[in-house]
Structure formats: C-alpha cells, structure tokens
Image: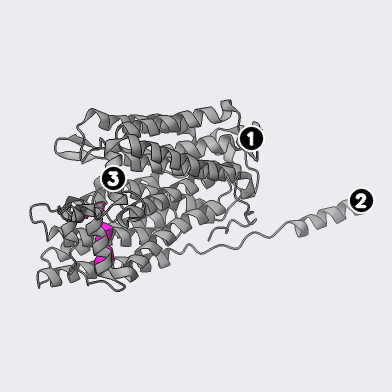
C-alpha cells in the first residue's frame, strides 16, 4: 500500500513540465514588412527621379498595391499560421518589390515593352495563391496522400509545351490567347512533393537494404525503381524540350533529398559525377546547348570577330562597371544586354547599379530565405515534412546558384528566372507558393503542442511518429530537441 502511494506521488514529479509558450513573432513580421515596402517604394521613387527627373506618376499606386499585398499576406499568416517563421514573408516581399523596381527601371529603356504593370498583376495572383495555401492547407502532411497524383500532374505539365512552337530555341512555353505560361515552374513544386513523400515512406529500405558496391550501398531496384523512373521521365521530357535549366534543378533536388533521406554521402559524389557526365554529353550533342557552352568558354569571341559583344560579355562588362558600390540606381548601361535584360540578366543590372555591396545584400537575402527553410526542416517531427522543407529550400538555392553562375560566367547559361526578381508570371506565382508551403511547415515546427502522429494524419499507419524523432533517421545527424520550440 505504501509503495503504491509512493509511486502515485512520484509520477507527477517525473513528468517533464510543459514547454513554455513561444512568442508568435507576428509583430516582428509586420515591422519587417513595413520596412520591406518602404525600401521598395524608395527605390521606385529613386528610379523616377534619376531617369525622369520627377516622381513617377504611378508611384502611389505602386506603393499602395505592394503594401496591400503584403498586408493581406500578413493577415492570412497571423490568422492561420501564427507561429510561422517571421522572416520568410518579409524577405519574399522585399525581393518581389526590388524586382518590380528594377523591371520598372528597365521599362524606361523600352517604351514599347512595359513589363512592370504585368509583373505587379502576377505578383497579386501569386499572393492570392499564397493566401489560399496558408488558409486551406491546415496540415502539410495531407499532401503526402497525393504523391503519385502530383507526379502525374508534373509530367503532364512538362509535356504540354511540346505541343507549342519553340521560343528562343526551347519549348518551355504554353501560349494561349495572348497569355504565356511556363508549366515547368509549377511542376517543380509538384515533383518535390512526390520526391519527399516517396523517400519518407521508403527511407529505411533505401538506407539499409540492397547490394554494397565499394563503400556505397545501392538500394534494391523495387525500392529505388519508381522514383528513378519518374525522375528519368521528367528529365527526358525536359531534355527533348531543351529546358536544361529545369532538368538540372530536378536532378539537384533529387540527389539532395536522396542524401537527406538515407544519410549516405556517396549519393552526393554519384550525383556530381552523373551531372558532369550528362552535361558534357548534352553540351556536345544538342546544338542549342552546345552554342551556350561555346559562349561560356569564349565570351569575347564576338568582339574578336568584329560582331560586337554578346549577352554574356555585356553582362561581364556590367559587373565590371559596377565595381564595389555601383554606378547608382538608374545610371547603368545594362539595357545593352538585349531582350533578356528583364529575365535572365536582370541580376547584371543589380550588379552594375548597386555594385558588389548591393549584390551581396541580395544574395544574403536569398541565403537567409534558404537557411530558414532548412531550419524549419530541423524542427519538424515527421520525415515527410522535413524532406519537403529541405526540397523546397533546395529549389530556391539551386535556382539562385544556377542563374547567378550563368550571368557571371561561372557556368553556362540555362535560361532560368531569378526567384522574385526577374520578369515572369509563372516564376513569381510558383515562388509565392513555395514561400506559403515553407511558412506552413515552419508553423508546424515552431508551434507548441503534443508530438505529431504522422500515421494518423497521412493514412500511413506503418509510419506513425510517437514522439520526437532524431533527424539522423532522415539523413541529418542532428537530434531534434524535445521541445516544440526547435527550429526557431
């Protein structure tokens, strides 16, 4: 009787105290959003004063439009994702606003091709879809049920441009009734959801079964086969359509998620070797890609031949002219680059007019955006959420690296759009969806509450998470703290 009473009195003392409530940081987010809008509006006014010697006539409308979009997004996050990371939304608004500023600046050089008004409309569509995702997607684990549907839709979206004429040597656009879309932009989110769901369900078999070849264990074909098949189909379609940039993006995300799911560093080495081999083969066989490789190897060949500098040479001249502090907003010569100055080469305008200092600030914004995505992955209890956060953050990281590397001459050009900065409706919409998903994932990672039970939410009873799961089980050798505050 005495021992029973002792056990009963000892039980409450042995129970760990509940984690203290964590601040939602929505006030911090609002302050940062105001700063992001003000910086963008000041840039818009500065361009008008330099180029037109007057305040732009539509400055008030531009500022009001960007401010309303930021406020609506903030309200959606405050109501539906109160514990989400407070930095993700302000960074996205600032990058989107800076993109509008520089597109407007370049519009002044091309009176017959005004892209800033359309970009603001596409930004509004992107924020509307951002709001829809934040409001309607209450639990990210629901997406796991639709993994194969996402893969099927991604394949259909990537096949669609093949039915339309090529543009600038690549079949990546769908043009209907005066509107143009780039379906591969939407497909990259869908294929990332599929990769994350499949690898989360099969991470144990991928890491511990199969044949060993040297120091690398190759998973069984029945486990690795479906995901490799889907990946090969997507890459084959993209290669046929000459969309090499997106195929490289898919490959990088696939390899990174495979490494994170298995914890096997050998996959990184295999991925790098396959990427180099594939790039060399395609660059040799495909004329369009071969031409870009030649431009990369010999950027000043046009000057030597008396034909004038090409786009890459003009881009390098722009970076050189910018120096450390830049020529000043609106005072650069980047419009000489040509038709791609508002998309592929808009980063050259940043480098010339804001200099190395401004360009570094932009890269730090992207780095912070990616880092917060990875941090959300560390705070999540379920493998699918962790892999999805890693995949979405990797999408942004690889895209920025590929584009920046192309316009600076580090790697051949790929024709992709800089996230949020470059002209392109499909790109800006997709990037807003990615931010919405990362916000939803970070809200789950930071919110207080009981441990997630993954099987109950996803319909996979064999994959139930009953408590804090070390992320080493999904390939990251860091353990999640017992508190739900991990990942702040």
Q: In this view, does 140 lie above or below 120?
A: above
Q: Depth check: give the residue in front, 319 or 359.
A: 319
Locate residue 406 relative to residue 111 in the image: left or right: right
Q: Depth check: give the residue in front, 329 or 177.
A: 329
Seen as rendered, the residue at the extreme top is 222
Residue drawn at 38 percent across, 45 percent down: 133
Q: Which mark is residue 292?
A: 3
Quarter of the image for residue 286 reads top left
Residue 145 visible, this angle: yes
Residues in magenta, as a range: 341-353
Residue 83 visible, this angle: no
Is label 2 or label 3 in front? 3
Q: Position of residue 420 (x, y in %)?
A: 30, 54
Q: Where is residue 263 in the image (x, y as percent from the top left)?
A: 61, 45
Locate residue 379 relative to residue 275 in the image: left or right: right
Name which of mark 2 and mark 1 comes first in the sequence: 2
**Magenta stretch encompasses residue 152:** no
**Magenta stretch encompasses residue 347:** yes
Seen as rendered, the residue at the extreme left is 112
Q: Depth check: give the residue in front, 366 or 354.
A: 354
Quarter of the image for residue 86 reads bottom left
Q: Where is residue 57 in the image (x, y as percent from the top left)?
A: 10, 65
Q: Which mark is residue 213?
A: 1
Q: Depth check: give the residue in front, 31 or 221.
A: 221
Q: How crowded is mark 3: few (under 14 residues within 10 Å), some or many (20 or more)?
A: some
Helix, strand or loop under label 3 = helix
Q: Mark 2 points at which residue?
A: 1
């Amino acid at each position: 009787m005495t021992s029973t009473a002792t056990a009963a009195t000892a039980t409450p003392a042995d129970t760990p105290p509940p984690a203290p409530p964590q601040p939602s940081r929505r006030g911090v987010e609002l302050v940062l959003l105001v700063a992001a809008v003000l910086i963008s509006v000041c840039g818009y006014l500065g361009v008008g004063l330099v180029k037109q010697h007057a305040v732009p006539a539509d400055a008030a409308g531009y500022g009001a439009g960007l401010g309303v979009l930021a406020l609506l997004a903030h309200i959606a996050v405050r109501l539906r994702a109160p514990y989400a990371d407070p930095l993700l939304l302000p960074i996205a608004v600032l990058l989107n606003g800076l993109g509008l500023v520089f597109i407007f600046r370049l519009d002044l050089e091309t009176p017959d091709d005004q892209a800033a008004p359309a970009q603001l409309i596409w930004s509004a569509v992107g924020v509307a879809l951002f709001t829809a995702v934040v409001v309607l997607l209450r639990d990210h684990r629901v997406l796991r049920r639709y993994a194969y549907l996402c893969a099927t839709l991604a394949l259909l979206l990537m096949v669609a441009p093949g039915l339309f004429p090529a543009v600038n040597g690549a079949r990546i656009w769908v043009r209907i009734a005066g509107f143009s879309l780039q379906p591969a932009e939407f497909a990259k989110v869908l294929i990332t959801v599929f990769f994350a769901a499949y690898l989360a369900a099969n991470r144990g078999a991928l890491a511990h079964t199969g044949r060993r070849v040297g120091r690398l264990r190759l998973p069984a074909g029945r486990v690795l086969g479906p995901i490799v098949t889907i990946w090969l189909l997507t890459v084959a379609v993209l290669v046929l359509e000459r969309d090499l940039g997106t195929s490289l993006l898919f490959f990088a995300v696939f390899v990174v998620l495979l490494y994170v799911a298995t914890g096997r560093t050998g996959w990184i080495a295999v991925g790098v070797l396959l990427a180099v081999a594939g790039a060399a083969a395609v660059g040799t066989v495909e004329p369009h890609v071969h031409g870009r490789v030649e431009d990369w190897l010999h950027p000043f060949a046009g000057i030597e031949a008396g034909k004038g500098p090409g786009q890459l040479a003009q881009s390098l001249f722009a970076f050189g002219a910018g120096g450390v502090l830049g020529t000043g907003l609106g005072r650069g010569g980047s419009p000489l680059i040509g038709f791609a100055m508002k998309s592929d080469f808009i980063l050259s305008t940043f480098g010339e007019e804001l200099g190395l200092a401004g360009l570094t600030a932009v890269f730090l914004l992207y780095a912070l955006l990616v880092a917060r995505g990875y941090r959300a992955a560390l705070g999540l209890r379920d493998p699918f959420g962790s892999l999805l956060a890693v995949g979405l953050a990797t999408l942004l990281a690889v895209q920025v690296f590929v584009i920046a590397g192309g316009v600076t001459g580090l790697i051949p050009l790929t024709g992709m759009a800089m996230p949020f900065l470059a002209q392109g409706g499909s790109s800006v919409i997709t990037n807003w969806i990615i931010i919405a998903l990362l916000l939803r994932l970070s809200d789950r990672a930071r919110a207080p509450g009981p441990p997630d039970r993954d099987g109950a939410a996803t319909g996979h009873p064999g994959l139930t998470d009953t408590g804090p799961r070390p992320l080493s089980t999904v390939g990251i050798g860091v353990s999640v703290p017992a508190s739900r505050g991990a990942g702040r």
